[in-house]
Amino acid sequence: MHEVYVLNGPNLDRLGTREPEIYGSMTFAQLADLCMTTAGQLGFRAQVRQTNDEAELIGWLHEAADGKIPVILNPAAFTHYSYALRDACAMLTAPLIEVHLSNPLAREEFRHTSVVSGVATGTIAGFGATSYVLALEALARQT
Ligand code: DQA
């Protein structure tokens, strides 16, 4: 079975209570379950991870690069300024799908820049937890 990493950056562990009017009421545990179930239905085995630590996230991307494993990535706030994360993403050879729960382009100006998009296969944003489902479906059509 194909493996896929679903990697999540800072503050996404707070889903459920974090600004629910923007990010919804689903907890991170529920989001992880949704991703694992959807991935299973599409013939993938998903490893869903979250960290508040940039170095840890970069380490996971190195793992994905070494294993040629496709990645669905919600870089959270790192999206907007982490060149180190972008450089790690640039090393991936399998598809990389950037996802966001909200639509950053419809929010504050500092969210309008993604340093990751330029090295991603594509970006899906604004559909809440469904952004992840759509990303898994896009991946299933690619591989
Ligand atoms: C986010 C959007 C980012 O701007 C924000 O910093 C996040 C979450 C999203 O999923 O909508 O933490 O990536």
Image (spheres, grey):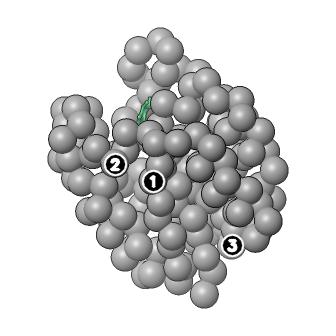
Picture residue at 68% right of the left edge, 72% below the top: 143
- The quarter of the displayed image where residue 142 is located: bottom right
Tag 1 residue: 50
| Amino acid identity at mark 1 | Gln
Give coordinates of residue 114: x percent, y percent.
60, 28
Disc 1 element:
strand
Establish whether ligand 1 lies closer than 8 Å to the Cβ of label 2: no
Labels in figure, total:
3
Furthest residue toward top: 109
Distance from the alpha carbon under mark 2 to that under mark 1? 7 Å
| Amino acid identity at mark 3 | Thr
Tag 2 residue: 13
Q: Tell whether 138 sits left or right of 101.
A: right
Tag 3 residue: 143
Tag 3–tag 2 contact (CB < 8 Å): no
Picture residue at 59% right of the left edge, 69% below the top: 4
Compared to 135, does 90 lie above or below?
Answer: above
Distance from the alpha carbon under mark 3 to that under mark 2? 29 Å
Picture residue at 22% right of the left edge, 32% below the top: 19
| Amino acid identity at mark 2 | Asp
N-terminal label among 2 and 1: 2
